Amino acid sequence: MLALRDIRRRFGSTIAVDGLSLEVRTGEVFGLLGPNGAGKSTTIAIATGLLAPDAGSVDLLGLGSPSNPKVRMHLGLAPQEITLYAELTARENLRFFADLYGVSNARVRVDELLALVELDARANDRVATFSGGMKRRLNLAAALVHDPKLVLLDEPTAGVDPQSRNRILELVRRLAGEGKTVLYTTHYMEEAAKICDRVGIVDHGRMLDVGTVAELVARHGGQSAVTIERDGAEERIFTADPVAEVARQFARANSDRERGEVGREVTGLRIERPDLETVFLSLTGRSLRE
Amino acid sequence: MRAIFAIARKDLRLLLRDKGDVFFTFVFPVVIAILFGFVFGGGSNSGSKLELAVVRESESVLALGIEEDLANDAAFETTAFPTRDAAADAVRAGKVTAAVILPKSLDSGLEGLFSGQGIAIDAVVDPSRRAEAGLIQGKLNELAFRQFPKLFANPTEMSRAFSAARSSIASARGMSPTQKLLGAGMITAAESFTSSIGDEDASANASGGGGGANNAAGNTADFTPIRVKVEELAPRAGRPRASFDVTFPQGIVWGLAGCFGAFASSLVTERARGTLDRLRLAPITAFHLISGKAIACLVAGLLVQTLVFAVAIIFFGSSVAQPAMLVIAAFAASFAFAGLAMALAAFCRTEAEANGAGRGAILILALIGGGTIPLFFMPPFLRTLSYGSPFRWAVAAIEGPFWRDTSVGEQIVPLIVLFAIGFLGWIIGARALWRPFAR
Ligand SMILES: Nc1ncnc2c1ncn2[C@@H]1O[C@H](COP(=O)(O)OP(=O)(O)O)[C@@H](O)[C@H]1O
Ligand SMILES: [Mg+2]
């Protein structure tokens, strides 16, 4: 669907994207996970043709670069900033973008989208009066007016409350269910883990690894940690198979009891499986959360 | 086409929804035009006195009395003019507010009054000075009435009046012989009474005497002792008929400045907030975007100008010398300011810049371009400076067909300058706005 090959881009002395390649497959939700300043937005801008890379190539649907308007028609972008007209209503905003794209039956399409992002009740209110979550949803809807095959969502949950965040995540899954391909950037690993079919980890403009969450964890997560608590004393054991380790520990405790050795009872037990956070930590030596 | 209109509609909506923009585009210019109109209008007259041209065609006591009282009245500054035409010219030229004509018919003095025709005084005013016309009319009525006591106290005038009244009673057709006799008796009584009193009480008798004659003449219903006929001059182009002619084009300039500031800052906002990127992603070209914005700018500019001209014509009696040329000038001015908006947006990177430095620049250009001080009041160096301001050219383009009634040849220069400013602005702005897409 979308292929970036060896993209480079610098701003003055800042290298924003440093030889990044990625391929988004048709029908998947691809997550670009990385901390602020990793180069996600720059990558998105290059992927849409808004920004020229210093080097590298972009191809959309095998049609070539999206700098060509005919190619660009197939993508929809919801930028990281709320790029709406605050003094226009939700409906007027969507209608304006629909008119720009020459959408046929614009009125019906706009109503559909308002319903999709659950803003039909506020359709005739100015965007300036909306909450952060509502603005985000409308920002997303505006990317969909022309029914694009590829939807690029740049941090679509930035600055919204948890409830709105869940609504947006559901919405993204729904788009995927309707056959859209989604490129999704975020610096929240929980989001990436929850909705992305595949995740690419970026830092300092480089793609560190790509795969499903399970694959990434298997490759970089290392061992799980099993923490066993006995009489207030904790013991941490690293293992590839935490369930087997727990079973082993219980078996040992049982045999101890049978042998009449008391005072060594297990009073607590915790399993920590590696996650994307651990993956990021092991890839960069830094925490994603800062 | 649909995209172009969508952009135009969007930009107009944004303009009309911003209270500040609406104020500075539509309300402020009208307020400025009216305010400056009064300021400059008052300034050209000495103090707050109304300047009157007085033409006295009659040598009568009545005419002399009115002339003297006008001259002594604190509200007026009078100048004697030999003929009606000379006085009318002075009104047209704006040298005086109105002309008062004390016609030959005043020779008949009180006879006219008692024979039921009343006293006629003419006033000539400029159509743009209707407010002052009312004041002058009232004042003339008052002054004419004030003459009555003097006339009643004047024996020759009185005997002339009484004999006129007697003869009018004698010839009156609707009266019975008894009524005629009664009327004649009343006149005789009044005659002996007025000749026995002094100046002090004369005014009390004035209305009584007038009333008696009035009844005697038998046409109570529509008798008005003094008729002040106010005539409005047919507007003649070529000179500002009033200070408003000068200040309304100034108002337009402020309106265009307001609307151009609004468009520039909305454009900067679009760029700074990334909305422009959304437009660039849509299957439209720079041509679509710029055409859409051009239409919005033009429509807004024409709206402002229509509004200001409408106020000028309806409330201030202005008239347009060359309507077709004025429409062209309005287009040219709107186009130039639309281009300026684009160029300004190109230079301002942030919204703060557009609203601070950008609007400041507009203010300075407006000031040196005749936005506040009319060009012909400017000291020479400022007038030379004004050539650098697009506002000056807009004022020149608009004034020509509005009241100067200049030849097409003279109007062509400001029009060319305005179109050139517009094109240049569009090109600069469009290039800065529409970065080419990545290859
Ligand atoms: N227009 C720009 N001018 C200068 N530096 C920029 C610009 N855009 C991005 N950068 C820099 O490039 C780096 C990557 O930024 P960005 O792509 O926005 O990261 P992310 O979206 O992952 O937070 C950052 O260091 C940022 O400061
Ligand atoms: Mg970003």
Image (cartoon, helix red, strand yellow):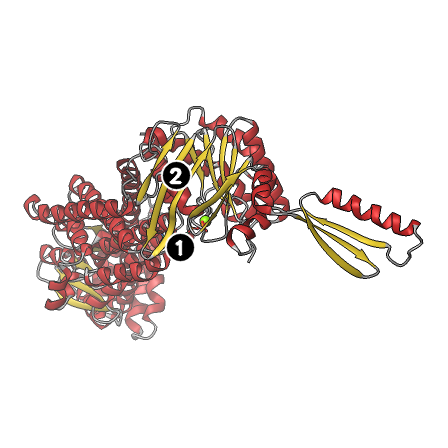
Q: Is residue A125 left or right of residue B335?
A: right
SS at circle 1:
helix
SS at circle 2:
helix
The disc numbered 2 marks a residue on which chain? A
Is the residue indicated by label 1 positioned so its CB lies within 8 Å of ligand 1? no
Quadrant of the rendering where the N terminus of chain B is positioned:
top left
Q: Is residue A180 above or below residue A215?
A: above
Cα distance in 3D space between marks 2 and 1: 39 Å
Q: Residues within 10 Å of mark 1 (few under 14, many from 20)?
A: some
Q: Position of residue A166 (x, y in %)?
A: 62, 42
Dot 1 amino acid type: Gly
The residue lying furthest to the top in this view is A104
Dot 2 amino acid type: Ala
The disc numbered 1 marks a residue on which chain? B
Q: Are marks 2 and 1 in contact (CB under 8 Å)?
A: no
**Could you tell me if residue B138 is visible in this image?**
no
- Label 2 or label 1, whichever lies nearer to me, is 2
Q: Is residue B345 left or right of residue B422?
A: right
| Quadrant of the rendered image containing residue B31 | bottom left
Q: Which residue is mark 2?
A: A47
**Could you tell me if residue A178 is visible in this image?**
yes
Return the residue nearer the eye: A221 or B415. Answer: A221
| Quadrant of the rendered image containing residue A62 | top left
Q: Which residue is mark 1?
A: B20
Q: Residue at x 77, y 54 (%)?
A: A228
Return the residue nearer the eye: B359 or A202. Answer: A202
